[in-house]
């Protein structure tokens, strides 16, 4: 069943009806994601399908595509990160139920509250963000400078305790 995407969905009713939603959401409307972005340009396109699996579980399958503009932590210039993710989530009503899921299913905790699809999409995009965004070494303007100082070799060679220490410091900044 195809329907225009509502803001709020009762997940169990969506499972019963086999609802299938697709559309796009402006990144500028995702406040939490925006904090991690250099520019909140463009949209995330999505498709979310509710169904029931053979074991009777409520399942939400989703695909989300977006181009995120982040700041490279090496050169501090903009970098575009294409994100294309797909997920299969099982609706659960508690942690105990989540613990019983097979490994290939991630839990989606649902309560009596309706599910806000935009929040779900934003959560998935946040999870997809790289921990330390960086250009590929060849594509990063700063890598030439670092290579001249011999820093690049240290980063790409076998990790020595000092390199790890440097990494930790950088993350702590
Ligand atoms: Zn860079």
Image (cartoon, rainbow, N blue to C red):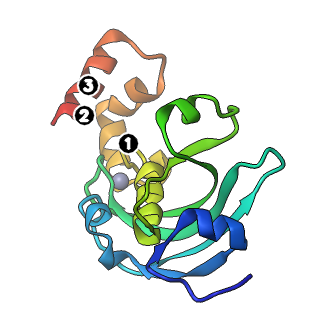
Residue 171's disc number: 2
Label 1's element? loop
Which residue is labeled 3 in the image?
168
Label 2's element? helix
Q: Residue at x 56, y 64 (%)?
A: 11
Residue 64 percent coordinates (x, y): 57, 67
Q: Residue at x 43, y 16 (%)?
A: 159
Mark 3 and mark 2: Cα distance apart in space: 5 Å
Extreme residue in the front direction = 112
Q: Quadrant of the N terminus?
A: bottom right
Extreme residue in the right direction = 54
Residue 77 percent coordinates (x, y): 29, 61
Extreme residue in the top direction = 161
Height in image: 27 above or below 11? below
Residue 68 percent coordinates (x, y): 42, 67
- Contact, CB < 8 Å: mark 1 with mark 2? yes
Q: Quadrant of the C terminus?
A: top left
Which residue is labeled 1 in the image?
131
């Amino acid at each position: 069943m195809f329907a225009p995407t509502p803001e709020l969905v009762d997940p169990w009713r969506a499972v019963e009806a086999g609802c299938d939603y697709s559309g796009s959401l402006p990144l500028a409307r995702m406040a939490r994601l925006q904090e991690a972005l250099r520019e909140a340009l463009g949209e995330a396109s999505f498709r979310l399908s509710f169904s029931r699996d053979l074991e009777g579980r409520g399942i939400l399958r989703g695909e989300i595509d977006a181009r995120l503009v982040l700041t490279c932590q090496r050169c501090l210039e903009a970098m575009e990160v294409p994100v294309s993710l797909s997920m299969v989530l099982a609706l659960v009503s508690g942690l105990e139920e989540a613990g019983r899921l097979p490994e290939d299913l991630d839990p989606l905790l649902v309560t009596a509250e309706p599910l806000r699809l935009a929040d779900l999409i934003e959560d998935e995009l946040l999870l997809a963000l790289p921990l330390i965004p960086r250009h590929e070494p060849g594509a990063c303007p700063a890598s030439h400078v670092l290579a001249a100082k011999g820093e690049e070799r240290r980063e790409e060679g076998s990790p020595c305790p000092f390199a790890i220490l440097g990494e930790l410091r950088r993350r702590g900044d």
